[in-house]
Amino acid sequence: MSQPTPMMRQYLEIKSQYPDAILFFRLGDFYEMFMEDAVTASRVLDITLTSRNKGSEEQIPLCGIPYHSCQPYIARLVEGGYKVAICEQVEDPRAVKGIVRREVVRVVTPGLVLDADNLSPKENNFLAALIEQQGRYGLACVDITTGDFRATELSCLEEVRAELASLCPRELVLAEGDDAGENLPGDLLEARMRSLVPAFTAELDRARNLLLEFYGHGSLEGMGCGHLSCGLSAAGMILHYLRETQKQDLGHLRPLKAYLSGEHMVLDDATRRNLELCASLQEGRKRGSLLGVLDRTQTAMGGRKLRHWINYPLVDVAAISERLDAVESLLEAGLLRMDLREALAGIQDLERLSSRISMAHANAKDLVALRKSLERLPAILALLAEFDGELLSRLRRDIDPMEDLLELICSAIVDEPPFVLREGNLIRDGFNPELDELRAISREGKGYIARLEATERERSGIGSLKVRFNKVFGYYIEITRSHLEKVPGDYERKQTLANAERYVTPALKEYEEKVLTAQDRITELEYELFQSIRQRTAAQGARIQGTAEALAGLDVLCGLADLAQDRRYVRPEVDESTCLRILEGRHPVIETMSLSEGFVPNDVELDCEQNQLVIITGPNMAGKSTFMRQVALITLMAQMGSFVPARQAHVGLVDRIFTRVGASDNLARGQSTFMVEMTETANILNNASARSLMVLDEIGRGTSTFDGVSIAWAVAEYLHDTPGVAGRTLFATHYHELTELAATRPRVKNFNIAVREWNEQIIFLRKIVPGATSHSYGIQVGRLAGLPPEVIARAREVLRNLESGEFERSGEPRIARKKGAPASAPSPQMTLFASREDPLRDRLRELDLMHTTPFEALALLQEIKRLI
């Protein structure tokens, strides 16, 4: 490339500092992109690619977008997985000779999006940092749109996977050369942008010093995170990354909050997915998930808070009871709750407003939105004064009405300001004397001249005195020659005419200067005043965030109370026991769907003394999985502080919920269906405790029958027999042999899904009843699914042959052999749990119940008892 121009030298120098970002280089009213950036941007944004130095041998690819409408373009690039560096002119081009100084003022990445139009209102937009140190993992996350900043420490990759599944960060920060980043499984990195920071940013001492200096504290213990080590390293990485990319004040970041897994119910990735907590399995959307049912929040803040409560259920009985007390109070006070929800509906997203204000991204409409929200706080406080509960009283104390801030915005910002700050019309009349005077000059020029003219006539005694204006001389006073002897001494001669003289005065000069520059000065002064007001508002960020936090919690509680009333939820009893007793429990999601049949409630009783492991048998489609999931969801809802869909519920604290439900390959990990099943089962057996709730569906079905039965049997025995692991367990299976465990294990109980047979068809009753079943009704289910009649008929024939042992390798029954043909030898394969000869089964097959009298039935029972 030949010698570049000064402007291109400036561009290349700035671009070299941001090689991994597309540089938006401000040139007048456009952001320009050059070379590789231009080629990429033109393709992604579908805009015209042109070139600089057209016609020369060294043409430079070029494309551009208007600076005032850049947000949609930035959003598309970020969604496409690109970083965007915003390079602005930091000098006034009118006051500079030569090249205007330019600097990158912000880097936009998926984890650092600020534009509200490109964010989901009820979801956090997390940026996460991960570091591995001495076998432990430090994880920190920040949402710069709300100021939420957290850090934790984890012991294994499964815990990392679970936490990332909860946070769903859009971007992951790793240290250069960090082993944790290099060794992370691909599924932890998929769909997430990875950004690197220098390795030294993860040094613990440096991270500590950076955090102390940022927050102005003398000790991390005072912030409640002094016990962390690698968690602090991850937090230091994030803070370094934010400073390098945002180039502005980050004072809205809340104090770093440390949390550990034992402080909440632990939910691994499989459990969140299988229980469909925040997204449905089929569509991956909120609709059809637990969140979709529970979310009746009126504010974006409340929606994010509810998502957090679902992902982090409590394990503290007192804290759970506080939430339940608040929901109960709001449920009982229906009219007050309706008024509260109506008041909350007008509250804007204070968390994100505060962040935009603090980072100087807010416009005047944002301040108006803040004002309108603050205006609703007195009514909310008055309504909350009617409640006495501890949590609601604390929320009321945490809501700061901020009358001083409300008064500032009301007196300063007009009701309908423009979006663009440089257009003026932002500040109210009466807020600033200089601005009022300039506006008066601009609006009332003729009136001011008339008043000035009258004043000068009276002062001079010259009745014919005129104040006039022309483009050459501007404003002047004209006096005829007959009155020249009356001209005041402070008049300065401007021009002599044949029969008159023209003069100017200091006041007229000053007015002329004001008139000529008034509109420019008005726009400039309004912008200066707005910046001052925004800075004063940003200084109240902690008060705004505290109020937002309280309002979000109140919003969630009101929504849960509203839902409890509509769906007939009841208050659960939550205590330290191991009892899990639910009467007439319902699945919170499925019962809301349009079903061809009414939802059938079911009971369950689990504990660690007599009913620790419940084996559930029954056909497919009968409702085993629904029943087990609803037990897990009711438990989770109770510990997050919600009422539950049941007639009665007693929930002894659960520290973790494990699920092994469903079967699918995980190609990202290179694992087959059975491998996924075994991995998830191993996770349960290795991490469960006596306080855990385990939901296992069809363990062992991904392999051969005998292997599957053996594994399922051994897993069930392990969960019953192993101290410290013997937690409350629901174990659904098609291996009916497992029901025999109830005869040898005291805490194993058998239940089944009731069905009825009629005319070779089955009717699902959806009811859990005591006892085991010996039929899977697979052929009947196949008929319901629409298998061809000839397939169903053949399947019944093969089943009869299998059950009677009359079956050849060809699939033909032995009775179909030609007369006189030698009988084939019996199969040497032994069953695991019964001998091949079974007189009881043979006798039962011979029975004709339709033609058996009561007396004969009693005799048959005696015979069956003897056979047993």
Image: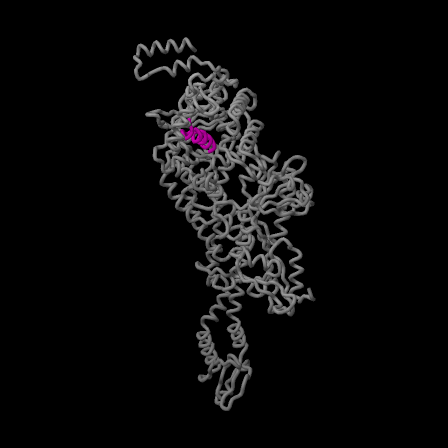
Which residue is most to the bottom? 498
Left or right: 321 as drawn, with respect to 246: left
Q: Does the magenta stretch include residue 106?
A: no
* Residue 653 visible in the picture: no
Secondary structure that dominates the magenta span: helix
Q: Can residue 430 be seen in this view?
A: yes
Quadrant for the C terminus in the image: top left
- Which quarter of the rendering shows the N terminus? bottom right
Say left or right for 295 vs 504.
Answer: left
* Residue 675 percent across, percent down from the top left: 56, 32
Residue at x 61% of width, y 49% of height: 242
Q: Position of residue 442 (x, y in %)?
A: 47, 71
Q: x and y percent of residue 564 in the render?
A: 39, 36
User: Please, is residue 780 above or below residue 204 in the view?
Assistant: above
- In the image, residue 456 above or below residue 417: below
In magenta, the rendered stretch is 619-636
Q: Which of 740/409 is in front?
A: 740
Q: In this view, does 854 lie above or below 641?
A: above
- Quarter of the image for residue 63 reads bottom right
Observer-nearest of 251 and 271: 271
Q: How many labels does the image show?
A: 0
387 vs 552, nearest the viewer:
552
